Image (cartoon, grey):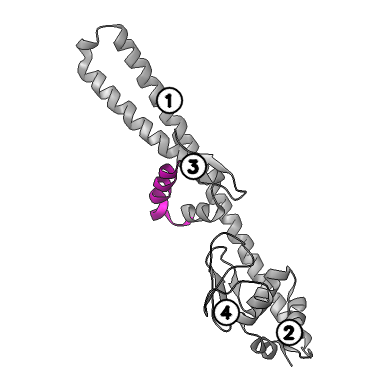
Amino acid sequence: MDAKEICRMVTIRDALKLAGARLRSSKRADCPLCKGTSKGTIAFTERLWHCHRCAAGGDVFSLVQAVNNCGFREALQFVANWAGVTITQANDEINRRLASQGRQRERTRRTAMKLAVAERTLRFRCRSQIHWIERIRLRVSERLCELHGGAPERFVHEVDALWAILESASRQSRRLQTTYALLAFGFQRERARFVLQPADRENLIDHALDQGFIGTDDGRMVEVTW
């Protein structure tokens, strides 16, 4: 009996139950991998599954590999034992599956590298803009002090313009520092979304400012109230 036949003998629902996952309905279950507070994050059919929280998914072998942190050979043996059958799998079938997984890992590695480079580029650009804004704020503040020490009523229009510039610079600085915090400390999925989906960036910044903090992957909270 080959791997495809063995795979068809164990459904995703059965595999989730054997993995200790809590089933919420006929198509939803808690994820045994991310173990977050979210409930019913896994959507599954008879043959496929996907977690909307940690983005893991695949067939029954992928589920067994993820839960048991093992390779395809071990997962195949797990499923065969559950199905109560003997493996007569040819080596080329196993090697094909392993080669496919190797290519997927390489694609994932390359994507992660590109994402990391894009994040660093955005952080550098953001830091440069923050320094530029801070220089403007310093110069405007110094000029306001000069006018205040003289006869400010003679320069009322300049004072108003300077205060408007200072207010605008402060707003920009706040958003830029929030952007930097998102890229430096935010959840990995939010950093990826910020880099890959430019249309969502303003919403991510607004959300962080409304919350007053940015959550990190290690469970910390970075304050963003300036």
Q: Nearer the viewer, mark 1 or mark 3?
A: 3
Q: Earlier in the sequence, mark 1 or mark 3?
A: 1
Query: Which residue, given by chain and number where applicable, does mark 2 sit on?
Result: 82
| Residue 213: assigned label | 3
The magenta span reads 196-212
Q: Which badge, 2 or 1, comes first in the chain's sequence?
A: 2
Q: Residue 189 in the image: x percent, y percent? A: 53, 56
Q: Residues within 10 Å of mark 2 (few under 14, many from 20)?
A: some
Q: How packed is label 4: few (under 14 Cα within 10 Å), some, or many (20 or more)?
A: some
Question: On the picture, is 100 further left or further right than 141?
Answer: right
Residue 209 lies in the magenta stretch: yes
Which residue corresponds to mark 1? 135
Give the mark toward the camera: 3 or 4: 3
User: Which tag, 3 or 2, sits closer to the chain's start?
Assistant: 2
Q: Secondary structure at mark 4?
A: loop
Q: Secondary structure at mark 1?
A: helix
- At 69% from the left and 75% from the top, the residue drawn is 64
For badge 1, the amino acid type reads Arg
Residue nearer the viewer, 70 or 149:
70
The residue that appears at 55% across and 51% down in the rendered structure is 187
Between label 2 and label 1, give the one nearer the viewer.
2
Report how far apart the C-alphas of labels 2 and 1 lie in the structure: 67 Å
Q: Are marks 3 and 4 in contact (CB under 8 Å)?
A: no
Prevalent SS, magenta region: helix
Q: Quadrant of the C terminus?
A: top left
Task: Say which amino acid is labelled 4.
Answer: Leu
Pointer 4 residue: 48
Q: Alpha carbon of mark 3 to alpha carbon of mark 4: how far?
A: 37 Å
- Using the numbered discs, state the Cα–Cα distance from disc 1 to disc 3 in whole angstroms: 26 Å
Q: Secondary structure at mark 3?
A: strand
